[in-house]
Amino acid sequence: MTETPNPNIVDADTLTGEMRPIRRAVLALGSNLGERMASLQGAVNALADTPDVWITAVSPVYETEPVDCPPDAKTFLNAVVLIDTTLAATRLMDRALAIEDAFERERSEVKNAPRTLDVDLIVVGDRRSNEDFLRLPHPRAGERAFVMRPWLDVDPGAELPGHGPVADLLEGADQSGMKLRDDLVLQFQ
């Protein structure tokens, strides 16, 4: 993130009159099952259709080798979406899970099992959370080139709170299994 959204800029909820700050959030998308590109585009569309969410940037798409996945896992398509939102982090997490469910994400006991869609919250403003259901910033984001590279593409001055500049984190991450897919472009309005 290049800057923390101004906490003095607020959006008034028209039903309750509640004032809520607008925060910048970073979401990472991934898919390695089924129609991977269609799943990523569907996630972008679903985020764009979410009340109180405004997409500000969508990264290029990368094809990446699986990291910490079962041996037979196929390659992923990955991208990052930057949004501004007045949603609370917990409501944004609920929305991310609902989007995954809409694309028939199956959860199993197998760590990092193949999936039709993964929507991870990386940061939500300067919010910190260490709850089981919500960890912010995402605890492994700084180690994952498939998060850092697309994030840096859309926000060259990005910083992962508590970890430092994304450019520096990317230098220490293994980028060998990543390939930019210029032929795949996610659309947003």
Image: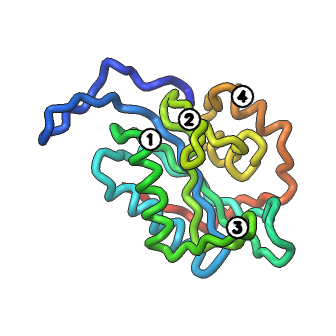
Q: For this rendering, which residue is in front, 149 or 137?
A: 137
Q: Mark 1 and mark 3 in contact (Cβ < 8 Å)?
A: no
Q: Amino acid at mark 4?
A: His
Q: For this rendering, which residue is in front, 36 or 163?
A: 163
x 52%, y 49%: residue: 81
Q: Mark 1 and mark 2 in contact (Cβ < 8 Å)?
A: yes
Compared across the picture, whether 141 is left or right of 80 comes to right
Disc marking residue 129 = 2
Q: Secondary structure at mark 1?
A: helix
Q: CA distance from mark 3 to mark 1?
A: 26 Å
Q: Which residue is mark 3?
A: 76
Relative image position of residue 67 (x, y in whole percent)? 80, 60
Q: Secondary structure at mark 4?
A: loop
Disc marking residue 89 = 1
Q: Secondary structure at mark 3?
A: strand
Looking at marks 2 and 3 on the same chain, the residue that comes earlier in the sequence is marked by 3
**Mark 4 packing: few (<14 Cα in 10 Å), some, or many (20+)?**
few
Q: Is residue 3 above or below residue 33?
A: above
Looking at marks 2 and 1 on the same chain, the residue that comes earlier in the sequence is marked by 1
Q: Amino acid at mark 2?
A: Ser
